[in-house]
Image: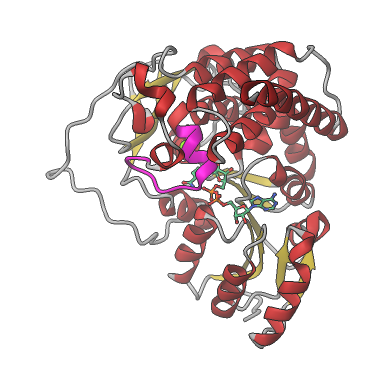
């Protein structure tokens, strides 16, 4: 399958929702894209079935304890891919010489090091893994600038903003670019109208049933608590060099507008489309060209009315915590991301109630001492300190 005029892609997190959507777009354009490497956390069967279709040269299973199962099943399936495991394996496929683009679609902090490896190798990095940027925005952006990597946003809101910014936008120069505000839209998730006094009985399956988007379970819970919008607020700050006051969150329950840029002359540019991640994925894959994403075109005649409202912090306490953390600085957003990963996992496995996610997050961020972050080691140390603290709160909550 290797050919010099094809664009070679590594997909980190190939077995997830974004990974699958990426492969769906790639499948529409066999004349343009070639899958060089795929990774999964532990789902060997799914990884093998993807390998049979896309014939990559490398397969990586992130959890080492599944490596022998991968070897066995790969041989049984008659595959001749090179097999790797662990963080080392992920980093190897993130920086292969023959790879042009890396889709960073691992969920959570686990994606940080492989994504940074792709950045340091100067790849075109298509960033879905927003947690990586929330954990160490400044170091991450510095690494992009140093290596000359091309960073393209997959997150639908950021992809929309990217599309609506002027072509000559200078990082951080909002006002010189004639922009007055970035309008970050969000649907409000599945509990936009649910009575607040019933939030304590929300189940994981209810939280994961998003009205407009079909996503992995962690980001689905984040969407229900609106921590997702909080993480996106921080992500936008680093991607586009914004101050906290430059971003306004607007609820738009229909998810047709994916975010907007408001200009000084009163113009507002919006990017619209059906809520389908194949659109931003196709945009990043082909950028600056355009390709078919397999997405149904918008039909304005049949469209439901658009509505907009403000996000209320009583319903979405995580949103306030995230915005406060963004203003407080890098140590606070690193801690918040870590606490949230622990809290969401505990909610998904039935150990805590829905409301306790926000309580644990707030407590951890308030308890972590402000500290300077100068290196990735600092980030990882703080991440693990915040996780320990979150687990302490968890034990108290479960006692
Ligand atoms: P998912 O849970 O469906 O998939 C996650 C992928 O990461 C899987 O391939 C899994 O095997 C892998 N993975 C999980 N834990 C890992 C670990 N410890 N080490 C290595 N690999 C691991 O998640 P998703 O919905 O595809 O989201 C992926 C990322 O994209 C997240 O950061 C999410 O916030 C972001 N994102 C997703 C969407 C969406 O519509 N799904 C939209 C915007 C942004
Ligand atoms: Mg998003």
Q: Quadrant of residue 270?
A: top left
**Residue at screen point 69% across, 26% down:** 395
**Image spot of residue 106 (x, y percent):** 63, 50
Q: What's the colour scheme?
A: secondary structure
**Image spot of residue 287 (x, y percent):** 52, 52
**Image spot of residue 39 (x, y percent):** 67, 62
**Residue at screen point 49% across, 53% down:** 281
Q: Of all residues shown, which one is farthest toward the left? A: 301
170, 399: nearer the viewer: 399
Quadrant assignment for the C terminus: top right
Q: Quadrant of residue 383?
A: top right
**Image spot of residue 13 (x, y percent):** 62, 56
Look at the picture and state if 194 lies above or below 323.
Answer: below
Look at the picture and state if 29 lies above or below 164.
Answer: below
Look at the picture and state if 322 lies above or below 127.
Answer: above
**Residue at screen point 47% across, 58% down:** 21
Residue 289 makes an appearance in the image:
yes
Q: Is 221 within the magenta?
A: yes
**Residue at screen point 73% across, 40% down:** 144
Magenta part of the chain: 210-223
């Amino acid at each position: 399958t290797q050919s010099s005029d094809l664009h070679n892609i590594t997909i980190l997190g190939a077995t997830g929702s974004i990974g699958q959507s990426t492969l769906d777009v790639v499948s529409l354009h066999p004349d343009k894209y070639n899958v060089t490497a795929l990774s999964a956390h532990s789902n060997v069967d799914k990884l093998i079935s993807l390998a049979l279709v896309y014939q990559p040269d490398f397969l990586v299973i992130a959890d080492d304890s599944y490596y022998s199962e991968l070897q066995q099943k790969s041989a049984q399936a008659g595959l001749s891919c090179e097999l790797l495991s662990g963080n080392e394996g992920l980093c190897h496929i993130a920086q292969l010489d023959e790879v042009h683009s890396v889709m960073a679609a691992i969920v959570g902090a686990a994606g940080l090091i492989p994504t940074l490896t792709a950045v340091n190798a100067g790849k075109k990095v298509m960033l879905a893994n927003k947690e990586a940027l929330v954990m160490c925005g400044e170091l991450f952006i510095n690494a992009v600038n140093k290596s000359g990597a091309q960073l393209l946003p997959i997150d639908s809101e950021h992809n929309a903003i990217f599309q609506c910014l002027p072509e000559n936008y200078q990082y951080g120069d909002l006002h010189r670019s004639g922009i007055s505000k970035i309008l970050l839209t969000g649907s409000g998730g599945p509990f936009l109208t649910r009575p607040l006094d019933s939030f304590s009985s929300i189940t994981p399956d209810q939280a994961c049933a998003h009205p407009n988007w079909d996503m992995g379970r962690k980001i689905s819970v984040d969407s229900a608590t609106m921590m997702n919008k909080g993480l996106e607020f921080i992500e936008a700050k680093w991607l586009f060099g914004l101050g906290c006051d430059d971003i306004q969150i607007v609820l738009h329950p229909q998810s047709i507008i994916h975010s907007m840029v408001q200009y000084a002359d009163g113009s507002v540019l919006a990017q619209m489309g059906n809520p389908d991640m194949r659109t931003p994925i196709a945009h990043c894959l082909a950028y600056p060209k355009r390709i078919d994403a397999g997405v149904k075109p918008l039909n304005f005649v049949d469209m439901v009315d658009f509505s907009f409202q403000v996000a209320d912090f009583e319903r979405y306490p995580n949103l306030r915590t995230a915005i406060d953390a963004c203003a407080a600085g890098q140590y606070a957003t690193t801690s918040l991301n870590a606490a949230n990963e622990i809290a969401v996992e505990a909610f998904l496995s039935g150990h805590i109630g829905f409301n306790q996610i926000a309580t644990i997050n707030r407590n951890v961020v308030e308890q972590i001492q402000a500290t300077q972050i100068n290196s990735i080691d600092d980030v990882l140390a703080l991440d693990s300190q915040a996780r320990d603290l979150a687990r302490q709160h968890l034990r108290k909550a479960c006692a």
